[in-house]
Image: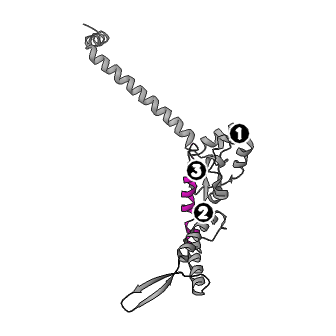
Amino acid sequence: EKSLDQLSELSTKDLPAELDGRKSERTDKEAMSQSASISMAVVSQRITKTDTEILRGVRLRDTLKGCGRLWRCNPMKLKPQARSALFKMSRPVVYLDIFLSHTWCSKGRAKILSLLLQSGCSTALLFWFFGVLLALALCLADVLPTPFWYSANMSHFKEMCPLGPWVMLFGFLGTLLGLLLSPYVPDVDVSAVSCLDARDMCFVDAACIHQTNKTLMQRGINGIG
């Protein structure tokens, strides 16, 4: 009688070559999948923990001051002293309200405009309102001329009314001025004025990650979370 080992050896030899190849291929795929899962787990463990010891933030309004000087230049093209000055714009924080990402290969004009519209819309609306009120007051006081005429024809009112471009002009200038000045507006109590939000502590890599010290730079990249 043949032993169990001999029977096993014979059964393995009797298997078709195609089945044996499929089994080997399946084993290789499983090994590669397991290796990839382990690698991803290691990488995830390294980058998902926020390094709170070096966590830094910068006020969004500070990044928009000076016509958004922070967004207009690639930090890698700056001199080391200028890159160190960017890092000094941020400060240690315990939390962040906003995480901003930006590709420094493109110009930052569109980013500046979008951030101004998003963060300064309340200030712009307020300045527009005061601009319209000022234009109305100056027109009613006959300080500003009204060179045009409008024929009003309503159900019980038919008159020639004086007309001027001042309301639209003052409103436009007030909106533009409000957007440009919004980074310089002091903090307000959000509990008292609910439509205004002063919480704008954000993360911008150019200011919150050290750009000259390679050790701190790598630590900052790994500690983003």
Which residue corresponds to mark 3? 108
- Which region shows up in magenta? 105-125
Which residue corresponds to mark 2? 199
Does residue 45 appear anywhere in the picture? yes
Residue 122 percent location from the top left of the image: 56, 69
**Residue type at numbered disc 2:** Arg
The reply to whether callout 3 and callout 1 are in contact (CB within 8 Å) is no
Q: Quadrant of the N terminus?
A: top left
Label 1, secondary structure: give it: loop
Which residue is rendered at x = 45% and y = 33% of the image? 37
Disc 3 versus disc 1: distance between alpha carbons? Answer: 25 Å
Task: Give whichever of discs 3 and 1 has the lower sequence position.
Answer: 3
What predominant SS class does the magenta segment belong to? helix
Residue 144 percent location from the top left of the image: 60, 81
Residue 20 percent location from the top left of the image: 30, 17
Which residue is rendered at x = 64% and y = 43% of the image? 220
- Nearer to the camera, 171 or 196: 171
